[in-house]
Each structure stands twice: as C-alpha cells, then as structure tokens.
Amino acid sequence: MDLYVMNCELLATCSALGYLEEDTYHREPDCLESVKDLIRYLRHEDDTRDTRQQLGAGQILQNDLLPIITQHSQDKALFDACIRLMVNLTQPALLCFGKVPDDPTVRHHFLEVVSYLQAYKEVGKSVKNKFLFTMTRQEEDNLLIERILLLVRNVLHVPADPYEEKNVDDDASVHDKLLWAIHMSGLDDLIKFLASAQSEQQWSMHVLEVISLMFRDQTPELLVSAGQARSAQEKQRDAQELEALRQKEQAEKRSRTLQRGTRHSRFGGSYVVQGLKSIGEKDVIYHRGLHNVSNYTHDEGKAVRRVPKRKLHARDSEGKRRSALNVRLFLREFCVDFLENCYNRLMYLVKEGLIREQAQQHDETYYLWALSFFMAFNRGNGFRADLVSETMSIRAFHFIERNITNYYEMMLTDRKEATSWSRRMHLALKAYQELLLTVNEMDRSRDENIRQSANVIKSNIFYLMEYREIFLTLLRKFDETKQPRTFLRDLVESTHLFLRMLERFCKGRNNLVVQKRVKRKKSKGRKNPTAAETTPEALEETWGALSEALTEGAVPFDAASETPLEEQRTEAMVRVQDALLNRRGPEALGLLRAAREVWPEGDVFGSADVEPEEELQLLKQILIANLPRPPPPEPGMEEEDGELEEEEELESVRVSETEFNFLDFIKRFASPNIVRPYLLLLRSYSQNSPHTNHCITRMLHRLAVDLKMDALLFQLSVFCLFNKILGDPVATAYKELVTFAKFVLNRFFALAAINNKAFVELLFWKSVGAVREMTEGYIIFCSHEEDELRTLYVEHRDSEVPDIVETLLPLLSNTTLTRRQVVAQLVAMGLVDSVKDLKKQRKGTRIVLWTEEQEEELQMLFEEFRDSDDVLGNILKKVTAKRSRARLVDKLLSMGLVSDRRELHKKRRRNPNAPGKSAAMGMPIKEHLIWARRPHNSWCWSTVDKWSLKLYFVTGMSGPLLWLQNCLNRTADDREEEGLFQPVPIVPLTEENEDAMEKKSFQRLLRKIGVRAPADEQESFWRIPAQMRPSQLRGAAEVLSPSQDALAAGAEESEQPTPGSPILEQQQGEADSHEQRAQALRALLLARKMKQPSASAEHTGQQIRHWLSEMAPYSQNPMCPGSK
C-alpha cells in the first residue's frame, strides 16, 4: 500500500507526532494526544484492517514510535501510550482476522499484515537493547510490565519469511538475531527472574509463552550437543547416511548407462508385448527401446486425476533448522539455568492456573510444549530427576491423557478447525512420549529411590486401562487427512516404547492385576413371573418385605431436614395429591394416614376416628384442591444430575480387575485398522530414521512371528512395498526390513502351494477370522455333511458329555474338519445360539470343589510327607483327585497347613561335611535356623495356639484380637449368604488396630490363621484368602476367642490409669525400665520355644505360667502390660 493513499485524518495524526532529524527525534506538543488518536483509530478499523495496513506502510513504528520510547522515556504518560500502540500494531495476524481467510481478497489483506509484522521484527532486532531496560520498575507499573511482555511475545511470534530468508544451517536468521539482541540486553535474565521470584508469579503464563517462542526453531538434541565434540555414534550415523547416498548415486548412474541404446534412435523398431492386452483384443505394440519396457504402464499419457481438497494428506509442520553456534550456546545455558532454578516452580504455577481455569483458551499447549522440551533436554544433559520432579507424576500422565482425549473429540466435532486440534493433539502426544522416556530413564538410574519411584509410576500407568489403551485408540482412529506424517511417526515410536516397557515389567512378575472393561448384557425381555409360593414361611418373608416397603413409603416428613414442619405439612399434602394424580391410590391413602398421626392438630388430614367414606371425600378434596407447589428445578441441572448418576452407575459396572497377559494385549493390535498406519509410515522408509523403521518392523514382527498371524500382511499393497524395498539400490542399509520382507514372502508362497485362493486374498485386507480361514482352511460344508452334523448333534446333545464337539469330531466322515470349523457351522445352522455355548473347557478346571474326604486325604498326605525334600511333588503323586500344583498350594494355604508358598519349594540336599553347614542336621546353617524357628504343628489350631493367645490378651492386644475375630465371622456370614468367594481386605480403622497390624508378632498370628500378606506394591492391606470356607473362618475365629484367664487379664488391663491422670504421670519415670525388662523376658521365652519346636501344649502352658510368675514383680507397675 502506497503512503500517498493514506487517509487524510490518519496522515495528519501521524504528522503531529514529531519528526526525526539525523539521530534526534523532535516531538510535537500534541504528541501524546496523537498517539491516543492512533489507538482510537485502530480500535475502530474495518474487517480488512485498513488502519493497520496504512500505519505499516507509513513505517510509523520504525520512524516514530521506537525513537520516542528510546529518547523520551522520561515522559511516563507518553511512554505508556507508545507501548500500548506498539502492542496493538504487533498483534499477530491470526488474532486480527480470527483465522487464515479463504477468500482471495481478504487473504491478500492478511498477507499484507504479515509482511508488515515481519518488517517490525526486522527492525526490532537492532533496537530492542535500547528500550527494554529504560523503564525503572515500580510497584504501580504492573500493567506496563504486562504490556512489555506482550510486546516481546508479539515480536517473537512473527513468522519467518521463506522467500526472504534462505539461510542454511549455522547461519543467523532474523529470529536468531532477535534472540541475540535479547541476550545482549539482559532480557533473558529478567525472564528467568520473573519465572523464579515468589513475588512475580502473576506473570507465569506470559513468561512461559515468551520462552516457548524463543525456542520455536530449536530441538533439545541440538542444544545439548552445542559446543561439544561429536560422539562416535553420531559419526557412525553420518558415515552410514553418506554411504547410503553414495550407493544410491552409483545405482542411478548404472541405470542411466543401461538405458542408452547401442543403435541409433531412428532404428529403434517396434515390438509386440505378448500377454499384455491393449484396448482391443490384440497385444500391445511397443514403439520404444527395450530398456524401458519393464516400466511400461497403461497410465502413461493420461491426465493426473485431481485429488479433492478433503482427501489431501495433512502437511507436516516446518522443519527445524540449526541456528548459529553463539545463539545455541546461549540458549543451552538458558536451559541449564532454567531447569535448576525455575522449571519446577513455573510449571507448578502454570498447572494450577490451568486447573483453576485462570488462563486463556488453549494456553495448555504452552505447558505441554515446555514439559516435552525441557524434560528432553534434561534427559540428554546428564539426567537429574529432581530437576523435573514437578511434572514427573501420575497427575501429569492424567492431565495429558485427558487433553489428548479432549483434542480428539474436538477434532471430530469441530471439522473446520480439525487441523488446529490435530496440532494440539500432537503436542500432547509428544509430552506423553517424553514422560514415558523419562520414566524409562529413571528405571535405569543408579539410585535405588529413583528406581523405586519409577516402579510405582509404571505400576499405576500399567494398571489403569486409560493409559494402556490410548495408543490403540490413536492408531485405530488415525486420519491422514487431518494428522500429519510426523504425528504418526511419534505415535509409532511412543507405542514401541510403551510396549517395550510393559513387556519388561511383566517379565519380572507372575501375575499383574490391571483394570478392564466389563460390558453389562442388556436383558432382551422379562421372563414370565412364576407362581409365588404359599407356604407360611414364604408368606412371612413376603410380608416382611412389604412391611418394610410400606414403612419406607409412608414417611410424610424428614426430621433431619432444615425445612420447617409447617412447610413439610404442605409438601406432604402435595405428595398425596401427586399420588392421586398418578393413580396410586394405596400410596396416597398410606401417606394420608401417616400424616394424620404426625399432624393431628386441626384435623387437617382428618380426625382420628374418621370413617372410610369420609376418608374418600377427603382424598377427593385434596385431588381437586389448588395446592401451592415449589418452582420446578431447572431442566439443565436435572438432566446434568441424572447424567452424573447414570455415569457413576455405569462406571461402577464397567470397570473390574483381572490378571494381565501381555500376549493377549498384543492380540488387540492384530487389526487392519492398526496395521494400515504402520504401512503408511513404512512407505517413506527412505526418509525415516533407523529408529522409526525399527519400531515399525518390531510391531509387524510381533504380529507375524509372536502371534503367528503373518497372513495379516498378505496384501497386494504390502507386497508392492516389499518389492520396492528389496529392489532399492541401498537395500543394505535396511537389513532389518529386508530380512522381514523375505520372511513374509516365503511364508506366503509356502501357503500358496497348498491354498490356491491365496492370490485372490491378496486383494483384500483381512480380519482375524479371515486370516484363520486362509491358513487353516475354509469352512465348506456339503448338504450331506450338514445333514450328518445335524443328526449327530441331535443324538448327542442330551447325552451330558463334558464336551459335545470333541465327541462329534471323530464321528464325522470328514476327518479334516477342525473344532473351530465345526463350532462355526453349528452356529450358522442355528443349532447353537453362540460360540460361547461350546467353549472348550480348560484342563484342570472341572474339579473345583473339595469334599471332606479329599481334604482329609490332603491333610494326611501333608503330614506324611512334610519332612521330605519335595512335599508338593510327593502329594501330587499320591493324591486321588488330580489337580494342578497351583490349586494344591492354594488349598494347603487355606487349610492352614503352611504359612508361605516357599515352604512347599523343593529342598536341595547338600553334603553334610561341606563347610558352612550344620553337621547335626545335614543342611545349611540358614536353613537349619529357619527350620528350628518353625513349630512342629504351626498350622493346626491346637491347644498351643490358645495358650499363646493369652499372651496377646495379657500384653494389651485384646482389642485387635476381638476386631480380627469379628472380621472373620463377618466374612464367613457374607460368604454363606452371597456365595461369593473373593479376597477380603482387612482394613484397620482405629489407631489401636493400625499399631497391631504393624507389629511382627501380630503379623505372625495373621499368617498362622491363614490371612495373606500384601502380594506386591499394588496391595496395601492384608487379605482373607478366597479359598477359606466359612467353616474354616469360624474355626479360626473360635480359636481367637479369649479364655477366662485372658479376659481377667484384659479386665485388669482396662483398669489402667488413663493418659493424663496424676497416677500415670507419677509412674512415667519407672515405665521404661520395666518395659525393657518385660521385653527381655519375652525374648527369653521365645528362645526357649525355638530350642524345643515340637513341645507339647502342656509343656508350653507350663512355660507360660512360669513366665507369668517371673513377670509378677513387674505387674504392679501400671505401665506394664497386664498390671492393675
């Protein structure tokens, strides 16, 4: 836009600002009013932003505003007004127009505004150090500080001009020059101060936004390596890339040499290509040299079909460039200082602002960028977990997962802005990937505490299904028209990392419990009600339920409500009227009579001796009366409450726990919807990094080799891609891909030798069922085979055989049929409703319940072989009802015969004469001590245990014992009533019970009665095993019942002085010494018991009496357990 076509009023206002003479700017007397007039003009500009364009064309910012704020900064009012005007002029074009315009005319204006912003950025790099520190900061300058931060943000946000800036790597661009000016002026130190100071936390979001724009063109890897010598790995990678380029160039040179004909072109001749039909019935006539005949296609010469705009692939963002070395060095130092002094505090403040919704829309993208960038820098620059502790938590995983889900939903609903939502989702995915990489780095740390923290985080993210299934969802829903190739690359690499961590985590654990979804089946219809029983017991039970329901429904008022009784009386009248309007007569009559008893005064609900006819008339009057009703609630709130209740109800049904199987989880990736994105990324294998190609190959290897589903890749487009890889001149650089492609092709040709339809199957993507049919055989039943199958099924369906399919298979004339084919045909013929009805029973699951005879046999075998080297192996050989080792171990634990699975491990017999062993027992000293501590009959509830329980009552453990007894009895009652046998956690709710649960002696008692300790870090409480029957639970509770002596001791204990009493304060000084003596005597008794593990109950009772007599002198002390 030319300066001479500027609006007259605007030109006059600009002229009234002042003039520049050489290097001195002379302002006019009404300069301040002119600046305010320009602000007013910008506020009322039209949709084309004409005022902004005219001021940009007139270079008002370069020639007037910058000289004013640098030379006349002492005039505070003028300085503030100029900063306001500069913030408005440098506002991003996207904020001015709302979006990139589609209309060509408006788009031209948009590009004009962008060009003026680039001119502002060009001049800003040289003057920024002149004005940023001219302001003397004061308390009342908060608004001015915010405007300066916004000005810096606007200038940094200006995009680069690709036509003007054609710099190579290591060359300084306009953005680099601006960053260097910021560094020379000291603004970077000011930004770090604002990020770390306690009194400047209101600028946290502005600071983070400025920092993100400063590092816009940088990558953490380049900054980490700035100023450092290249490593051997980097040199090797560069050498491999150079070698690949050299091989490719040589291959192209050889192909050009072969294309040159030996004869002159005019004697090329014409050829007939046999087997390749032309438009008619004849073969194609080829008029060119034979060196190009292999590349002939019918598509030559055809016009390229235009791809619709909605089907165009999404474009990748602009690539990163390497800035000048001095810029990278100063940015590297900035990152180091920022991580050490500012990162944790700033990220905490920003996160709180986002959670409390104190930030603007989409400000969470700056948080996600900062998380991924600085955590990646920390990981490459000598990883320190304490520097990023604020963002290394389960809350961070949850926050990012929630944002990914929100972005995906918005991408589907807001289709016009789908590209923007896709970019935000890419940022969230990068942050999630960096969290996983940091956890993986923590897992390899030398510090045990850091490794333990990483283990806790992995346990949580692997346990919750949202974190496990996020990659499945993103891969399944990938859309190449909205999501760029870089998003797919990061998604594939993140999935590879997650699966590798999950696989390593599962290898060290036998059973990993995770959450899963449980789909509740909807009932198709109500069954016809059966006739009710008329026995007296049934009638009595029916009346109990009815009376309870009637009592609940006939409550006319709420005593706990804050509503006055007068208003509740009116509400009761309204409830009676509503019941009459809904034709619920009995309910209305019950409410009327109940309200009559609550409010008898005034005979509002009738007198006490009212007749039935009068009651009917009263109900009629209530029905036709115009009663005052409260205003109805807002429909939105009511619907919202209903939705919340419905969601909570559904969530409680959908989620359950199950044991995790890694191979079953990998099976969920065996789907064409997930394989297609991998193959789409594999098409650009020559442009991918070696790590990306490895991630793709590893996933395809899991499907083809680990799951044996190589037929999932038998598709024509996949084979074309493999052919391209195998024919690549630099195929030696992709050894892994070449090996895998050859494996898949060999498997296909081996299958094609026995399945002549395999070539037709190449045209289609195949599901898991189609893959199975292709490899195992197609289901083809003739009419006589169907009749035979129907006849045999009808004959044997009522024979009560355990597995009818296994019975039918040897009777069929076609012996090549598999079980799966027979089951599918039975379902197709309508003889069976579902495949689940014919599900094959697993081995070892038929025998579930234990009879009393089997339990007695197991106990006898255990007593017989308990001293042998292999207790469990001998029992398995002799037991009548064959069961698995796991079931036998669980039963032995539930019966209380062993306290730990390790007691059933096979013992190794060693040479008794070897050094370091016990000559008396012929076993190592450690095993000898363990065996000596083990009582002879520690898992039988005998008299010895009852004598031992007296110690707990005497030593102040009567309360926890009674609590434990109640837990056992309550669990036994629940299992008898509901018939559900699940592990029940024992949760202590009082401080006394918590202290008891932490004591080793009480834990030994819990193991003695069969209570299981926490299995791993996912469990916090002891649990009553699911294998313990109600009779066993009651037996254990009966053993815990206190005897008369123990009750007497407990009564004496209850008479102890309460805390804070004068008696207790006087005796506090002697308590410690007496307690130490009591502990010494208890240790002496335990040592005597260890020396005689097989002592009888009577002898043990004598020891306890002797111990009590020794404790008598100390029992007089109120602080000593058991004293009065």
Image (cartoon, rainbow, N blue to C red):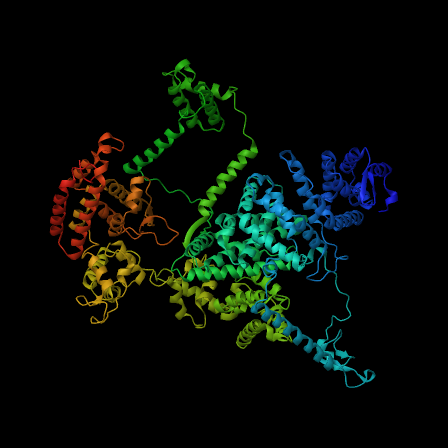
Q: Tell me where residue 1078 appears, x and y as whole percent.
A: 19, 45
Please indicate whether residue 219 sits to the left or right of residue 254 in the image: left
Above or below residue 268? Residue 1058 is above
Which residue occupies the foreground of this view, 655 or 1076? Answer: 1076
Viewer-proximal residue, 923 or 709?
Answer: 923
The quadrant in which residue 737 appears is bottom right
- The answer to whether residue 541 is seen in the rendering is yes
- How many callouts does the rendering have? 0
**Quarter in which the C terminus is drawn:** top left
Q: Which residue lies furthest to the right in this view?
A: 4
Residue 15: x and y in percent read 84, 38
Residue 966 vs residue 567: left or right?
left
Residue ID at (52%, 23%): 629
Across and down, in percent, residue 708 comes to: 49, 68
On the image, the x and y values in percent for residue 416 come to 68, 48
* Image position of 725 with respect to 1028: above or below: below
Q: Quadrant of residue 145?
A: top right
In-front residue for pair 427/839: 427
Farthest residue to the bottom: give it: 263
Left-right relation of 512 to 417: left
| Residue name at image x 52 percent, y 20 percent | 628
Would residue 429 be visible to someone looking at this image? no
Of residue 470 and residue 771, the one placed in the foreground of this image is 470
